[in-house]
């Protein structure tokens, strides 16, 4: 059943009553978004750890002889897994309004599996202890900024636009650094990246809250179910990217690297 945000469509209903219905619906919607995000994060982590700790690792990062001795190097599946998440994001972004709810949910889980496979290398580069420590730092930071974005009365639209500009700058700088290999530039990218994804977390939370009336509240339960999955993907991407940026700054590298 779809609820109208206009209190005048309810004969005899007061503005307070309608506001209460809207507020309850918003809380339920945000809880659904966070539940999808948490489920996706768990699946991503399980896939990454499962590949890194089993013989599946040989399929993604086979052992080869190098000038530094036997080392694991990225194989074809590893490169495929690096680009696969982007493909799922593009499909969801383009087709979220045309696909069925089941298809959107299936693509979301497929994205999480692909993302987990792409993150396998963090267990090769960093110690497990530092991965866990940085994860909890990321979780605390993300939760704080998401709560801020949900509760603040300030309009974060301008900040969101600025953060998106910073995101494009990070992407360009990262591509350049693939050829330059500058540790100073990588440090700068990581620092700016943390600031960008912290800001995007607050901005996207406020945007999801505002969009609820336009996309979910006013369009019915089926559309709300799809939007919840899509919105959870946005927050999940912010979390993962924030985690990776913090890991580059705070993570302890494995003795094998």
Image (tube, rainbow, N blue to C red):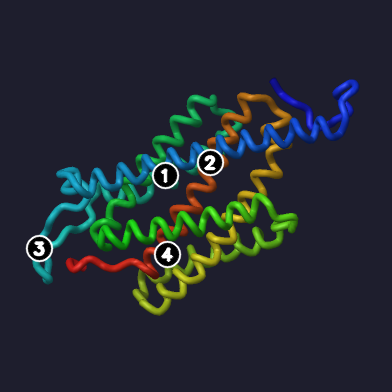
User: Which disc is residue 41 wearing?
Assistant: 1
Question: In the image shown, does 125 or 80 lie closer to the viewer?
Answer: 125
* N-term-proximal mark, 1 vs 2: 2
Circle 2 SS class: helix
Residue at 56%, 35% in the rendered image: 32
Circle 3 SS class: strand
Residue 74, percent across and down?
A: 23, 55
Q: Which residue is mark 4?
A: 246
Indicate the quadrant containing the C terminus: top left, top right, bottom left or bottom right: bottom left
Q: CA distance from mark 4 to mark 3?
A: 29 Å
What is the crowding at mark 2: few (fewer than 14 residues within 10 Å), some, or many (at least 20)? some
* N-term-proximal mark, 4 vs 3: 3
Q: CA distance from mark 1 to mark 2?
A: 10 Å
Above-or-below relation of 140 to 253: above
Residue 26, percent across and down?
A: 67, 37
* N-term-proximal mark, 1 vs 4: 1
Q: Which residue is mark 2?
A: 34
What is the crowding at mark 1: few (fewer than 14 residues within 10 Å), some, or many (at least 20)? many
What is the crowding at mark 4: few (fewer than 14 residues within 10 Å), some, or many (at least 20)? many
Q: Which residue is mark 3?
A: 70
Residue at 71%, 23% in the rendered image: 2
């Amino acid at each position: 059943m779809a609820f109208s945000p206009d209190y005048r469509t309810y004969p005899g209903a007061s503005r307070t009553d309608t506001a209460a219905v809207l507020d309850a619906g918003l809380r339920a919607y945000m809880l659904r978004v966070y539940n999808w995000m948490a489920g996706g994060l768990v699946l991503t982590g399980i896939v990454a750890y499962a590949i890194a700790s089993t013989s599946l690792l040989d399929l993604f990062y086979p052992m080869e002889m190098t000038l530094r001795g036997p080392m694991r190097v990225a194989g074809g599946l590893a490169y495929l897994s690096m680009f696969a998440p982007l493909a799922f994001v593009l499909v969801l972004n383009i087709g979220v309004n045309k696909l069925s709810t089941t298809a959107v949910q299936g693509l979301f889980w497929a994205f999480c599996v692909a993302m987990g496979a792409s993150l396998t290398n963090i267990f090769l580069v960093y110690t497990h202890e530092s991965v866990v420590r940085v994860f909890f730092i990321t979780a605390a930071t993300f939760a704080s900024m998401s709560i801020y974005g949900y509760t603040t009365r300030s309009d974060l639209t301008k900040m969101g636009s600025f953060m998106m500009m910073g995101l494009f700058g990070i992407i360009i700088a990262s591509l350049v650094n693939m050829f330059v290999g500058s540790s100073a530039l990588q440090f700068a990218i990581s620092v700016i990246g943390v600031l960008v994804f912290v800001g995007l977390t607050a901005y996207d939370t406020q945007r999801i809250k505002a969009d609820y009336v336009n996309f979910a509240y006013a369009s019915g339960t089926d559309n709300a179910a799809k939007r919840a999955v899509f919105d959870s993907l946005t927050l999940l991407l912010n979390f993962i990217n924030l985690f990776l940026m913090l890991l580059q700054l705070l993570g302890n590298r494995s003795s094998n690297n």
